[in-house]
Image (spheres, grey):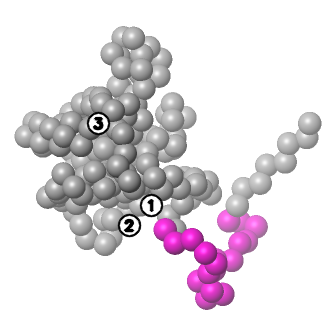
C-alpha cells in the first residue's frame, strides 16, 4: 500500500549539513510535503514550542513527526526525545519519533526504545529503509504506555496472548492509580 505523504510535516534534526541535505532530498523523493530543519535538539525544542505557541511566526502549522540524529552537540537526540516524552512544556508527548543513528548495538536500540522512540533507523540508510520506517510508524500506531518508569509507545511488537513465562506480573508498585471523585 502506497502512502500519500504530501500532507505530512516532518521535523528533521541533525548537526551535519551533508546529512540534512541527504535526508531532505530523500524525504522529498518519497513524497513528504513539508520538512523543517533543526541543527540540534535544543533548536528542535525551540521550534516545537514556537509551532505550538505561534505557528504563523514559526512558519509551519504543525509538526507530525520528528526524525532526529542521536549524536549531536550541544543537545543530542536522546535529550530531545526525553524532553518530548517527559517535560511539562512538551506540547505533544505522543508525537511520532524516529531515531537516526550509527550506533546500532542492541543496547543502543533498546535505549532508544526505552526513551520512547517509535522506530530506530540505522546509518547508513537507504531511501527505501527511510520510507519503510516512516510507513511503519504511521501504519502501526502503537498504544502509549505510562508507568512510573516509562512513557512512550508500547514496546511490544507482537500481538496475541503471552505464555505464563512471558507475562509480566502487575504489582501495586507498578501502576499509579488516581481516583477522581466527581
Pointer 1 residue = 114
From this view, report whether residue 87 is shown above or below residue 165: above
Disc 2 crowd, CA 10 A, few/some/many (<14, 14-19, 20+): some
From this view, report whether residue 175 is shown above or below residue 8: below
Residue shown at the point (34%, 38%) measured from the top left: 5
Structural distance between the alpha carbons of marks 1 and 3: 27 Å
The residue tagged with tag 1: helix, strand or loop? helix
The residue tagged with tag 3: helix, strand or loop? loop
Q: Quadrant of the C terminus?
A: top right
Q: Of callouts 3 and 2, which one flags the residue occurring earlier in the amino acid sequence? A: 3
Structural distance between the alpha carbons of marks 3 and 2: 28 Å
Residue 174 in picture, x, y percent from top left: 68, 65
Structural distance between the alpha carbons of marks 2 and 1: 6 Å
Pointer 3 residue = 32
Residue shown at the point (58%, 54%) measured from the top left: 143
Picture quadrant of residue 108: bottom left
Disc 2 + disc 1, Cβ < 8 Å: yes
Residue 47 in picture, x, y percent from top left: 35, 25
- Magenta region includes residue 33: no
Q: Main secondary structure of the magenta part?
A: loop
Pointer 2 residue = 110
Residue shown at the point (84%, 48%) measured from the top left: 179
Range covered by the magenta-colored residues: 157-174
Amino acid at each position: 500500500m502506497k502512502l500519500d505523504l504530501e500532507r505530512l510535516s516532518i521535523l528533521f534534526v541533525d548537526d551535519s549539513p551533508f546529512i540534512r541535505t541527504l535526508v531532505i532530498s530523500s524525504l522529498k523523493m518519497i513524497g513528504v510535503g513539508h520538512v523543517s530543519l533543526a541543527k540540534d535538539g535544543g533548536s528542535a525544542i525551540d521550534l516545537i514550542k514556537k509551532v505550538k505557541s505561534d505557528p504563523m511566526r514559526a512558519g509551519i502549522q504543525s509538526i507530525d513527526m520528528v526524525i532526529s540524529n542521536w549524536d549531536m552537540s550541544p543537545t543530542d537526540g536522546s535529550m530531545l526525545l526525553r524532553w518530548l516524552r517527559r517535560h511539562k512544556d512538551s506540547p505533544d508527548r505522543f508525537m511520532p519519533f524516529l531515531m537516526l543513528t550509527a550506533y546500532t548495538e542492541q543496547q543502543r536500540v533498546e535505549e532508544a526504545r526505552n526513551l520512547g522512540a517509535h522506530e530506530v533507523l540505522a546509518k547508513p540508510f537507504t531511501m527505501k529503509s527511510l520510507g519503510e520506517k516512516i510507513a511503519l510508524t504511521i501504519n502501526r500506531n502503537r498504544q502509549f504506555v505510562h508507568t512510573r518508569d516509562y512513557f512512550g509507545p508500547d514496546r511490544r511488537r507482537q500481538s496475541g496472548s503471552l505464555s505464563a513465562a512471558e507475562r509480566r506480573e502487575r504489582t501495586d508498585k507498578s501502576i499509579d492509580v488516581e481516583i477522581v471523585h466527581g
